[in-house]
């Protein structure tokens, strides 16, 4: 595993921060003469997820059962059982979430409740977001992840603008005052896949604890010249200053060299199976992402009724692309014409301070919990490119000679955007009776964005955006284990990533979103089962659309909407058997939207927005058929999607099947054999660059994984 060693060295070098010396000095592999390690046996999702507090759905420390919203969590046991090494694969096993990843969006674009992209579905890392950009590239690997929480529907009142579809919060493993425990995971697989993960955490003494995780992955990929690799590091030190005050210093770093693959063009209107593994990018192509997150957090708990938290953080991202990105089949020459030779670099930085306080008490003799807080940050984004122009010549569809990157335009810094942002928020829950509670929240976001043209040295614009989002919901416990909830919320989305805002889009206001949601949540059969049901209607207004009277002019009057039903089930239905399943049905459409076609404004009213599947389903079944043996199977279904606003190009629906067999050698060691997409279904994840250029998903793969704790 030479790559793993070199990637590990690079990751450790680039992740060097003040806490590194302390981590290295920690007694990571200290003997534990009196400690008894918990068995490594994975029990699936038996923990009561509806009764476990979820920070993503509320700032009040509520459980999903107490929250008037649709909140779902994936715990560490589920991550290990399902074998998803990528965060995006784990997230899309939850209800109503689909992905359309491609290199241009950092392989991270999600769709939720009919709305797609980084301006509508928010990524968070331990509750913090990278503000104002698109193409979030961290986190990406699940080895260092303790839990992933998904909030479906507008999340602006909790996390700010840009989350009308929902929010995904990736929560890393953290220090704990437990005996030191070390972990190792090693994987080999088809396509020369190799993975290695190392982790350690526990108490150094009665006041100081630590956690670090390191992982590396490499593979030759499922297309020609598909080699890709990555490495990630996360580490944290926690110091208990007093019984009431704790400090935590954490740092995470990620390095990625993704597969340099931009899809396959339609040939005379269809995809050809013979081209499934072809790669038409240039030989010297490049995709590289480097991210680091550093945070100093403090938690003060002077009493059981009061908690104050604050975090000072810095985020940095460097992203580089150099590729021939656009491919079009030429029926006259029977070759694939390549254009759009694109070289781009992003240099993004963000520094911020966030704080909140939670107070539990009485309001006129009623139980009441109040949270108030603020978030302030400053971001800087510099964009370097070659104007996305150039061609490396045509290639044979079946035997492409990749050639080399060519562009006559200079690769120079083009613009810099800066944003100063602050937010004030509050949330309150009042229990009118032991069964009935009302939860409300407000959040005011304010951002001042300015853009400087680095070629001319002129200021393009300075613009201020602000929004007041709010949510009002109620929960009624029909029985101790069955809750009925309803909510109304208003939110906002920017017309694009604010740090990439163009002078043309700067003239437009934020899009507005409104949602009505009702649902049921229940734990039943003495805790062996849980199910949820949610129905919603979301409307988003102020879309940018073409003026029917002047197709060359854009106006902000458009509207789109979605309505749907989501259901989840987790059940231990017999000794040794467990099933987890979810299904989603929705109707997403443009209500008022036109685009220019041949210089004419054409209405797309009633059409489904691109990359939005209206049917989704997932299932996971595990069977502990012998004391140390567990068989598992997973099914993922994604309905048809459209590649264009006119709905003339349809990406077909698909279903993939995963199988696994785990042997628990003893309480500390397990070996798992896995097969992904075992029936080798050919499917498409997204359309990129043009509606006629589609990206294939991975084919059949097999892996063997060793997990060991010591």
Image (cartoon, rainbow, N blue to C red):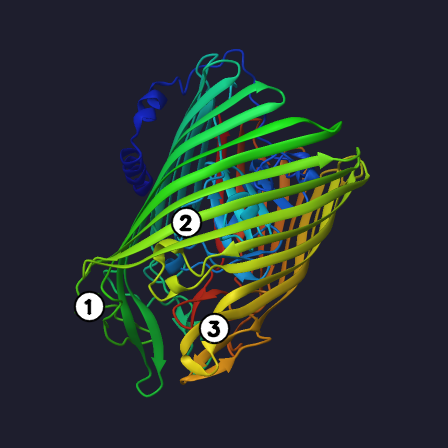
Q: How far apart are marks 2 and 3 (CA)?
A: 24 Å
Whether residues under marks 2 and 3 lie with C-beta atoms below 8 angstroms apart, the answer is no
Q: Quadrant of residue 212?
A: top left
> Horizontal and vertical percent for residue 142?
47, 41
Q: Earlier in the sequence, mark 1 or mark 2?
A: 1
Q: Which residue is drawn at 30% across and 29% down?
A: 17
Q: Residue at x 57, y 42 (%)?
A: 149
In the picture of the structure, the residue carrying the numbered disc 2 is 447
In the picture of the structure, the residue carrying the numbered disc 3 is 545
Q: In this view, does 163 lie above or below 438?
A: below
Q: Residue furthest right?
A: 479
Single out the mark in the foreground, 2 or 3.
2
Q: In which quarter of the image is residue 282?
A: bottom left
Q: How far apart are marks 1 and 2 (CA)?
A: 39 Å
> Horizontal and vertical percent for residue 344?
27, 58
Question: Which of 671/581 is in front?
Answer: 581
In the picture of the structure, the residue carrying the numbered disc 1 is 406
Disc 2 residue crowd, few under 14, some 14–19, many 20+, Cα 10 Å = many
């Amino acid at each position: 595993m030479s790559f793993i060693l070199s990637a590990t060295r690079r990751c450790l070098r680039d992740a060097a921060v003040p806490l590194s010396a302390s981590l290295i000095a920690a007694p990571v592999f200290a003997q534990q003469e009196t400690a008894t390690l918990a068995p490594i046996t994975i029990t699936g999702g038996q923990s009561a997820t509806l009764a476990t507090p979820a920070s993503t759905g509320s700032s009040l420390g509520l459980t999903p059962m107490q929250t008037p919203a649709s909140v779902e969590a994936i715990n560490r046991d589920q991550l290990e059982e399902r074998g998803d090494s990528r965060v995006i694969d784990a997230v899309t096993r939850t209800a109503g979430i689909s992905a359309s990843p491609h290199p241009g969006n950092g392989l991270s674009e999600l769709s939720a409740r009919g709305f797609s992209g980084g301006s509508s579905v928010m990524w968070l890392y331990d509750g913090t977001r990278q503000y104002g950009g698109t193409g979030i590239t961290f986190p990406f690997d699940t080895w260092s992840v303790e839990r992933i929480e998904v909030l479906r529907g507008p999340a602006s009142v909790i996390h700010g603008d840009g989350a009308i579809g929902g929010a995904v919060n990736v929560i890393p493993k953290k220090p704990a005052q437990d005996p030191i425990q070390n972990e190792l995971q090693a994987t080999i697989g088809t396509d020369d896949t190799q993975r290695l993960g190392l982790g350690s955490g526990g108490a150094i003494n009665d006041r100081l604890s630590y956690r670090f995780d390191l992982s590396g992955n490499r593979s030759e990929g499922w297309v020609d010249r598909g080699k890709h690799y990555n490495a990630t590091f996360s580490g944290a030190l926690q110091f208990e200053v007093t019984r009431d005050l704790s400090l935590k210093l954490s740092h995470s770093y990620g390095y990625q060299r993704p597969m340099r693959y931009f899809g396959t063009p339609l040939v005379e209107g269809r995809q050809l199976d013979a081209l499934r593994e072809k790669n038409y990018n240039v030989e010297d192509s490049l995709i590289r992402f480097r991210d680091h997150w550093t945070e100093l957090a403090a938690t003060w708990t002077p009493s059981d009724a009061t908690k104050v938290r604050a975090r000072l953080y810095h985020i940095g991202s460097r992203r580089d692309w150099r590729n021939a990105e656009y491919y079009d089949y030429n029926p006259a020459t029977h070759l694939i014409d390549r254009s759009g030779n694109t070289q781009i670099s992003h240099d993004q930085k963000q520094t911020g301070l966030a704080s909140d306080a939670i107070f539990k008490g009485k309001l006129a003799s009623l139980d009441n919990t109040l949270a108030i807080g603020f978030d302030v940050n400053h971001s800087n984004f510099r964009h370097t490119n070659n104007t996305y122009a150039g061609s490396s010549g045509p290639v044979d569809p079946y035997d492409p000679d990749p050639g080399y990157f060519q562009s006559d335009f200079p690769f120079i810094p083009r613009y810099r955007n800066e944003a100063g942002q602050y937010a004030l928020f509050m949330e309150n829950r009042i229990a009118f009776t032991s069964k009935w509670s009302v939860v409300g929240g407000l959040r005011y976001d304010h951002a001042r964005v300015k853009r400087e043209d680095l070629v001319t040295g002129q200021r393009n614009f300075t613009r201020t955006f602000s929004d007041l989002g709010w949510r009002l919901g109620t929960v009624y416990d029909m029985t101790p284990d069955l809750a009925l909830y309803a909510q109304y919320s208003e939110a906002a989305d920017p017309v694009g990533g604010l740090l990439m805002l163009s002078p043309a889009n700067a003239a437009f206001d934020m899009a507005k979103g409104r949602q009505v949601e009702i649902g049921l949540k229940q734990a039943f059969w003495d805790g062996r089962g849980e199910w949820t049901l949610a129905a919603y209607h979301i409307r988003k207004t102020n879309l940018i659309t073409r003026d029917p009277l002047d197709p060359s002019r854009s106006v902000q009057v458009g509207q789109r909407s979605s309505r749907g039903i989501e259901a989840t089930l987790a059940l231990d239905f017999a000794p040794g058997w467990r099933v987890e399943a979810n299904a989603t049905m929705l109707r997403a459409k443009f209500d008022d939207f036109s685009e220019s076609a041949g210089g004419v404004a054409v209405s797309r009213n009633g059409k489904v927005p691109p990359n939005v599947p209206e049917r989704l389903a997932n299932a996971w079944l595990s069977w502990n058929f012998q004391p140390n043996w567990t068989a598992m199977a997973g099914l993922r279904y994604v309905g048809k999607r459209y590649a264009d606003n006119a709905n003339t190009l349809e990406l077909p629906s698909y279903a993939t099947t995963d199988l696994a067999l785990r042997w628990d050698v003893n309480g500390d060691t397990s070996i798992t054999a896995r097969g992904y997409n075992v029936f080798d279904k050919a499917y498409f994840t997204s359309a990129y660059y043009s509606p006629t250029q589609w990206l294939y998903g991975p084919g059949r793969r097999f892996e063997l994984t060793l997990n060991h704790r010591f």
